[in-house]
């Protein structure tokens, strides 16, 4: 009778439907020396619960926090540095004339500057285009893989016909 009651309590325990009193009965049963052989697998579980009740935390918990560096002064210094930089930069721009857009009045000199700029762009473009040259060999490799696929299809046709 007691064994049936314990089995019913275990079923309720596994479903999460036991009360605290029923769990206390299970702990008391599994703390005994004589347990039914088919219920031996539950003994370590309930032995752990009994052992964990005896554990205590003995370390001290520090309640004071460490003093932190006041970062507000760092933020103020950063704002002052930025404002000083903007002020000095704006003073430098005031000294130049407003109509000076960097235009060149001499047509021959302007032509030479454009040619120099286009040569620089051309050199950079050619350098970039030369690094992409390996794509031709990649395309050859892809074509070779296509031939292997055709060979595989033909071998499948041969082996399917021989069956």
Image (cartoon, rainbow, N blue to C red):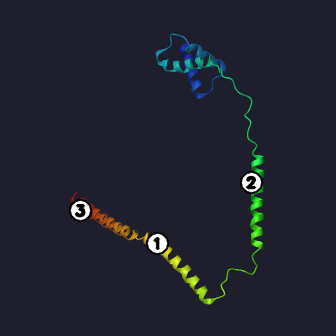
Q: Give the camera-side residue of 51 and 8.
A: 51
The picture places residue 88, in percent across and down from the top left corner, at 76, 65
Which of the image's four quarters has the C terminus?
A: bottom left
First along the sequence among labels 2 and 3: 2
Inspect this view and state whether residue 1 appears: no
- Mark 2, mark 1: which one is toward the viewer? 2
Element at badge 2?
helix
Alpha carbon separation for disc pair 2 and 1? 42 Å
Residue 131, given in percent of the width and then of the height, sits at 43, 69
Identified at 75% across, 57% down, the residue is 81
Residue 85 occupies quadrant = bottom right
Secondary structure under the numbered disc 3 in the rendered image: helix
Residue at (58%, 82%) from the top-left corner? 113
The answer to whether 87 appears left or right of 36 in the picture is right
> x, y (%) of residue 120?
53, 76
Identify the residue position indicated by label 2 in the image.
78
Between marks 1 and 3, how big is the CA–CA gap? Answer: 50 Å
Residue at 49% in and 14% down: 36
Q: Which residue is mark 3?
A: 158
Residues under labels 2 and 3: Cα distance? 78 Å
N-terminal-most mark, 1 or 3: 1
């Amino acid at each position: 009778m007691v064994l049936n009651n314990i089995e019913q309590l275990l079923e309720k325990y596994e479903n999460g439907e036991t009360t605290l009193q029923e769990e206390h009965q299970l702990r008391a049963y599994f703390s005994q020396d004589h347990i039914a052989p088919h219920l031996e697998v539950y003994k370590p579980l309930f032995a752990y619960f009994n052992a964990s009740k005896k554990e205590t935390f003995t370390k001290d918990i520090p309640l004071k926090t460490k003093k932190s560096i006041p970062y507000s002064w760092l933020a103020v210094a950063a704002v002052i540095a930025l404002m000083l930089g903007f002020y000095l930069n704006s003073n430098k721009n005031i000294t130049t004339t407003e109509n000076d857009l960097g235009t060149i009045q001499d047509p021959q000199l302007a032509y030479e500057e454009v040619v120099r700029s286009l040569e620089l762009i051309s050199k950079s473009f050619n350098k970039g285009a030369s690094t992409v040259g390996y794509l031709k060999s990649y395309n050859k490799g892809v074509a070779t893989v296509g031939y292997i696929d055709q060979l595989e299809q033909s071998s499948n046709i041969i082996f399917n016909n021989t069956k």
